[in-house]
Structure formats: structure tokens, C-alpha cells
Amino acid sequence: MIELVGVGKTFNPGRDNEFHAVREVSLSIEAGRVTALRGPSGSGKTTLLGLIGGLTRPSVGRLRLHGRDISALPERFLTALRRDTFGFVFQQFQLIRDLSVLDNVMLPAVPTGRPHADIRARALRLLDEVGLGRRAAARVQWLSGGEAQRAAIARALINDPPVILADEPTAHLDSALSRQILEILAELRRCGRTLVIASHDPLVFEMDLVERVVDLRDGRVLA
Amino acid sequence: MNTWIERQRGLIDTTVANLRRRKARNLGLLLAYVLLVFLLASVVLFGDGMRREARLLLEEAPELVVQRLTAGRHDLMPAQWLERIADLRGVAAVEGRLWGYHHDAAVGANLTLQVPREAAPAAGRVHLGATLARLRGLAPGDVLSLRDHAGQPHAFVVEALLDSRSELVSADLVLLGEADFRAFFGIAAGLYTDAALRVVNPLETRTVAEKVLARLPATRVISREEMRRTYDAVFNWRQGLPLMVLSVLLAAFALLAWDKASGLSAEERREIGILKALGWDSGDVLAMKLWEGALLSLLAFLLGYTLAWLHVYYAGAPLFEPVLKGWSVLYPHFALAPEVDISRIVSLALLTVLPYVAATLVPVWRAATLDPDEVMRE
Amino acid sequence: MALFPARRGSGLAAWLLAGSLACLLLVLADASRMAEERARERAQGRALVARVGLTDLALFNEARYTRHLSQADQHAAFQDHPGALEHFPAGSLAGPARPSP
């Protein structure tokens, strides 16, 4: 469903600190499957994940979603498309301090203009599903690492996107908590969602969650 | 349409949640803002009120006042001059006015002694301004003793007090009869302080003034219009008293706005980055901050303006009293009449709301147009 | 499901704005009543201005040239020296009357 054709990303082009994070990657992500991007830090996993999710615009190459080229869409359309298609789970949780867990989970749905009551009900249900139902009113900085990551997953699901992109979902978590998170991801897979996980945590690959591994090194896909 | 409204409501919800996160800081900001609007609006309302009051009160003032000048100074006017003015075409009536100042050592105040045009008190009797009477503790029947030009004490019986509702024009007035006035100041008969004119056709006031000057070049002619404009100038918001207060306020306001405009904290930038990564576009972020600025400044404006209105019209502008009073001992009690001036309200609202909203938007606009993948690159 | 009541921030904001707007409208609505009352008071002042032939407000009586601002000669503030510093606060607020344009 997602196709990358000869995609590359260069930061600070033409300057002293020019940096090619991703070079000539051609890749297709199949719907309903779990793809893992594997590689050491600095291999371009995060950038590639951003490219797949439309968060980063490619410097060269094309990005197709359902066969449609979206790499040159104006920001407004791309954002709306991204909102409806992808849910992001970031490496550092990226929750907004001092807001309640519920408010954080509801944030991605605000620009959609869906009725508030619906969004709220869905957010509470998702929090229940990830086992945080009782913590909905708590401020996010009171959460433990595992709870924060589960809140972040609930947030990624609020717009009911078919694709979940997770960047190092088990980093900063011990193995018990990591398994818990991977369980939740496996459950998402069973519900028919497409998953792309960037990770170098062996635990992710031990469990029989990942169906396809893409190895990365220095911004290139290893054959 | 419903989606649009629901989205804006959602953005407002987020804004309010955001404001609540730093309750103390934002409440402080709101208070400072309310105070600013309050002072700003007080100055404008007070200035407008005073100008209106001066204009309406002075509608009854003489149309023209002619002063004699000797070597550039105000001098007493001989009665013959009055006759020469009365001869001029267009002059309906001329009256010699008698008024002067007396420093009352007992209270350290300057009094204005004046002979009224009509209903002058009988010999040995005076009518007192209510402010002065209050200061000296005098009531009708009491004796006001003043030293005349020769140092001799004169005892006047207080016949009546001027209505306290006229204090704005009568605070320090001592009205007395002509004979008493001349004896007190040692002014010979046939001399007047100046001359008050009534003209036949008010539209020709300027022409009459020119004629007076042509016939009596050593005079200064002051029209009622000029009296009015004197007070317009004192209470105009672009000069005089309001300008002094306003310049300080605007500086404070600029500071507040500058603090906002000079940039976002790293924390705020990071949060905007998160929102963008979560699927907010630049427009959503800007709209949220717009709501934040609009909410804060609108609330501050409404509260500040209401307080200013109460301050100026209900409480009698106590904050401005010391400024206006300066070193004078006599300060009249007076109440200003309110007038709802929509254009003033709107311009004041724009003056206070727009710069703040603009100042909050500029840095956000810069941050909101960043790439959404910034959060991922940490 | 309802763990805690769904109180929306936008509702709170609307209440605050509506409340303060109501306060403002309330005092503005009182203006006409008050203006009438004050106009009656002003009638006393106007009558006195007409009776005595007054030309100025009795606001600044700290100095001769500020008590009757419109009557003071234009050099009054500088009669000691053209560059003399202002003695009285009121004098710094008030410029001399300007002639008609």
C-alpha cells in the first residue's frame, strides 16, 4: 500500500554539515503486515520511518500511497492524509507535560472536527484497552515509562489509522514492560492494522511478531 | 460548517487546557493586562469626560473676553475702553469684569475673588465656593476674615454657599459686591480687570474679535472657543495629562508584547513540533494560539474597561486626583457624566487586543511552519 | 465510562467572556440614567458660570496662571526667566491656548 521509489533524504543540503540520512531507498510496505526496520543507531531508521509516514518530505524520489504520488502534496492535504492514515508512536513518548492523559490522547483528533463527545468516548475506551482507564485524569508526567508508552499508543490510535508507525517502542523499557508493549502491538496486528517498527532491540525480533525485516546501514537498505 | 465549529471548539478546549497548565503565570499575565487596560481606559474615559464637562459648562461663558495688555502683561482696563468696544458693530453688550487672586495664608490656598454679573452679595457679605467653605470650616453666618491690599483685616459675613454641585467651576470662589472688591484690592472706580462681550451674531465672533483688536491694539481677545480648546488640549488623550500617563502605559504594554514576541521557549517549540507530528497543520497551531491571544486579551479588555468605567464614573477617578491636584490645596468634588461612545470603545479594544494577538502570533507562526519531523530528530 | 465529568474548556471560556461582557453592558446600560442625573447637577454649574461670567474650571488653583488657564497671559510661566523650569505640576500639563486656525 505504501511505496517508496528511489527515496533519499539530505539534511542541510549544500552546507558544511550536509548529511545524507537516507539514500535511494526503494521499498514497499504491504497492508496488514508487520515490517521492521532494523539497523544500528544512525543507520537512518527514524528518518525512513518519517518518510514512510509523510512526516518528512523526501529530497529525491517518490512516495506513493495506494498508488497515488503524495510526495509533492501541499502541507494541508498531506497533513490531513497523514492524520487519517498513520498513527505515530515516538521514541521519547512525546507527551505534553501538565496535560491530562486523556487530553494527550485526544490531541490528534482535535483538528478533525469530529464531535467532542465521540472523541472523548473513544479516547477513554482506548485507554481502557491499554490498561490505563483509571489514569485518564492523571497528568502525564506522573506516569511510569511503561504507562507513558501505552498512553502514546492510545494516542496513535485515536483517529483509527490503518497504519501504525512505531519508533523504538521498547527503548527505555525493561524486558517485562517491553513484552507488554509488544503484546499490545501484536493485538493491533490481529485487528488488521499495518505496522512498521523501527528498532534495534533483539527482543522485538525474538517474538514472532515481525513478518518482514528490512536491514538498514548508512541510510541504505541491505539486500 | 459543523466540523469547522467543532474543530474551533476543540482548539479552544486545548487552549484553555494549555492556559491552565501554567495557572499562576497566566493569571499574573491576565492581571497585568487587566491593569493596563484599566489604566488606559481610565485615562481615555476621564479625559473625554473632563472635555465634555468643560465644553458644556463653558457654553455659558462670555463669548469674548478682552484683556488690556501693558508691556505684554495683563493690566486693568479703563471704563472708556469699554465704551469704545461697545460702539463696535456686532457687539450686543459689554460688561467690565472684576476678579482677582488673593493668597489666603490661613489655609495656604489661592482664592479667586470675583464680582458676579448678577445677584451680587450685599456690602460686607460674600458667597463662598463649597470646596473653600469645607476647607475653612465655614457655614452661612460665619465670618471670613482676609487681609486686604493694605494689610488691614476685612471681615466678611458668609451669606450663602455656592451649590456644591458646581464645585468644578467654583471651588475657590469668593463672590462679593463691587464696592467691597474695589476697597479690598484698592482698585479705583472706572477700572476693570477685563471686559466680557456678548455678540449679536455668534457666527461673527471672530470678525468682532478682529474689530476689537483693530480699534484697541493693546489688547488680547479670548473667545469662548479658545477657552473650550484650552481644556480640550489639557484633557486630550494625545497631549497633556493623558499623554503623560499613556506614554508610560504604552511602554509597559510594549514590554509585555515584546516579551511575547521575542520568542518561544524551547519547551513551547517542542510542543508545537509534537502537535505538528500528531497531524496538526500550521493553520491549526496558529488558530489555537490565535484563540489563546484573543481569549486573554478580550477578557482583559472587558474586565479592564468595566473597572475603568466604575473608577471614573462611579468612584470619581480617585487615581487621577493627586495628579490633577498637584500642589493646589483646593480640589473640587465633582462627578463626570458618562457617555457611551462606541467608536471609542472599539478603538480602545483594537489598540489593546490587536497588538497582543499579533505579538503572540509572530513567533508561533515561525515555529508552526517548521517541519513536523523535528520531534523525531532529537 | 464517565470517569470524571466532561467539562469543556471552551464552555468555561464562553462563560467567562459572557460574564465579563454582561458586567460591561450592565454599567453601560446605567449610563443614560447616570448621565441624566449628572446633567441636572451640571445645570447648577452652568447657572453659576452664567451668573458670574466665569471662563475657566477651578481645577488647578496652585498658581495664577493655572487657575484661569484660558485667561493667563502666554508668558506667565516664564515670567522669571524664559528658560525657567516649571514650578507647578499643572503647568506642565497645560499648554497655552492656541489661536483659532
Image (spheres, rainbow, N blue to C red):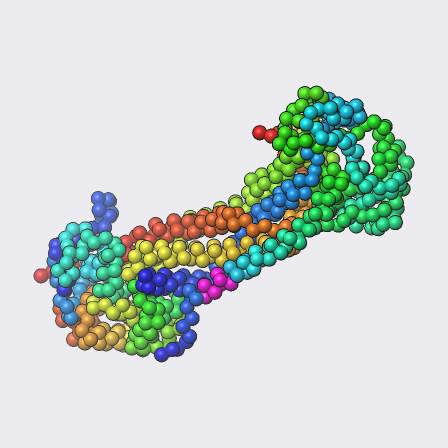
Residue drawn at x 31%, y 63% is B3
Inspect this view and state whether residue B199 appears. yes
**Residue C39 magenta-drawn?**
no
Residue B90 image point, x, y percent: 68, 27
Q: Quadrant of the C terminus of chain C?
A: top right
Q: Is residue A28 left or right of residue B199?
A: left
Q: Quadrant of the N terminus of chain C?
A: bottom left
Residue drawn at x 41%, y 68% is C8
Camera-nearest residue between A142 and A106: A106
Q: Is residue B7 left or right of residue C59?
A: left
Q: In the displayed structure, would residue A137 be above or below residue B162?
A: below
Residue A170 image point, x, y percent: 26, 70
Inspect this view and state whether residue A205 appears. no
Residue B53 image point, x, y percent: 65, 45
Q: Is residue B203 left or right of residue B256?
A: right
Camera-nearest residue between C45 and A101: C45
Q: In the displayed structure, would residue B273 be above or below residue C3?
A: above
In this view, which residue lies farthest toward the left? A223
Camera-nearest residue between A119 and A135: A119
What span is colored magenta in the figure? C12-19
Camera-nearest residue between B216 and B302: B216
Residue drawn at x 26%, y 65% is A88
